[in-house]
Amino acid sequence: MSYNQGMKRRAFLAAAIAVACCGLLSAEDLAVLRFEPACIFSAVAKHHRVDRRPEIPEPRLLLSSRTTIQEYHRLLGDAPFKPPVVQNTFLPKHNIILLNDAASLYGKFGRTLDDVAAHEYVHYLQVFYTYSREYTMGLITGGEDFLEDEAVRTQFWFRDQVAAGADVCAGR
């Protein structure tokens, strides 16, 4: 399955969950970050042996519960596919990470909002640190699997560290 097919499948599943849900989400229906975004970012950067540079701005993190679908679609710009619900994604053009914080998406297989944030921070590092920005922006939208694989491996690493009781924020 290609990256774009995977994104479409995830969008369909998220839309089905949104339809099954009945309207607006209450506070009990929202997942929350266990760690501060800066902590997650630092842990991911350290794991990838990236020395953060102050002249490169960190991405803004937006949650679906505080982002309208219209704003999400505006941020997607001229993307050929616009999911009906906010997807977990990094938007390099705007330097924004969007996370869907519907609690129903988490808990299965130990998945958390924190490890999904770690996944998206990898895409940020790929764009601004690891690869050239222009090259990576084409790859992320073009479906190159190795970028997604790297992000998934880091997501699992982060999840395993937290599950093992490691203090991922120590020394940050």
Image (cartoon, rainbow, N blue to C red):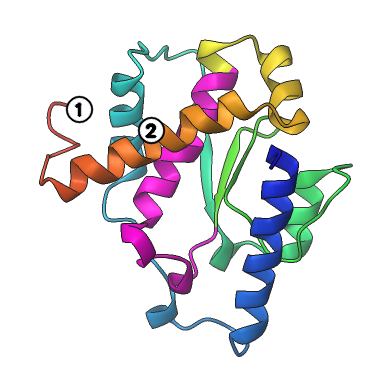
Residue flagged by tag 1: what amino acid is it? Arg
| Mark identifier at residue 172 | 1
Return the x and y of residue 61 as percentages of the image width and height: 50, 45
Return the x and y of residue 125 as percentages of the image width and height: 49, 22
Give whichever of 37, 10 is nearer the camera.
Answer: 10
Residue 32 in sight here: no
Q: Residue at x 51, y 17 (%)?
A: 56
| Mark identifier at residue 154 | 2
Q: Residue at x 35, y 60 (%)?
A: 109
Q: Residue furthest bottom?
A: 22
**CA distance separating discs 1 and 2:** 18 Å
Q: Residue at x 35, y 22 (%)?
A: 45
Whichever of callouts 1 and 2 sits on the residue coming sooner in the sequence is: 2
The boundaries of the magenta stretch are 100-127
How many marks on residues?
2
Question: Is 17 above or below relative to 53?
Answer: below
State left or right for residue 152 relative to residue 93.
left
Q: Is residue 107 magenta?
A: yes
Residue flagged by tag 2: what amino acid is it? Thr
Question: Is 39 above or below relative to 111?
Answer: above
